[in-house]
Image: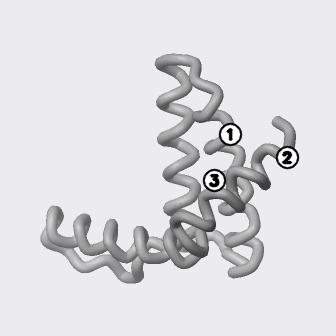
Amino acid sequence: MDQSIVSGIIEERGKIYGDPALSHANIGLSWTGLLQQHYGQELSHPIPGWMVELMMCAFKIHRSSRVYHEDNYTDLAAYARFAREDQAREAVKPLTP
C-alpha cells in the first residue's frame, strides 16, 4: 500500500471529521456506554481509542473477506497506522486478569 495514498486519505478525512485520535476516543466512550447498558455491567475503564482502531481493522478485514473493494484496504492501512501510533504513544502494556 502506497503510504502517500494513506496519508492523503487521513489528511482529507481529518478535514471533514477532525482529529482522528479524539474521534476514536469518543467512539470508545460511546461503545463503552452501549456495552455497559447491554450487559448490565460496568466496565473497569472505557474502551481506548487504539482499541477502537484495532476493532475497525477487524471490521475492514471482515469486509475484505467478502468482496474486494480497494477502499477497504486503504482504510485498513489508515486504522492500522492510527492504532500503532496511539498504542505506542500510550505505552500500552498487556492487561493482566
Q: What is the crowding at mark 2: few (fewer than 14 residues within 10 Å), some, or many (at least 20)?
A: few
Q: Earlier in the sequence, mark 3 or mark 1?
A: 1
Q: Earlier in the sequence, mark 1 or mark 2?
A: 2
Question: Which residue is identified by label 1?
Answer: 74
Q: Which mark is residue 34?
A: none
Q: What is the x, y in percent for residue 54?
A: 57, 54
Q: What is the x, y in percent for residue 62?
A: 49, 31
Q: CA distance from mark 1 to mark 2?
A: 9 Å
Residue at point 76%, 48% (across, down): 6
Q: What is the x, y in percent for residue 27?
A: 41, 69
Q: Is residue 80 above or below residue 40?
A: above
Describe the element under mark 1 as helix, strand or loop: helix
Q: Which mark is residue 3?
A: 2
Describe the element under mark 2 as helix, strand or loop: helix
Q: Nearer the viewer, residue 97 or 55?
A: 55
Q: What is the x, y in percent for residue 74?
A: 68, 39
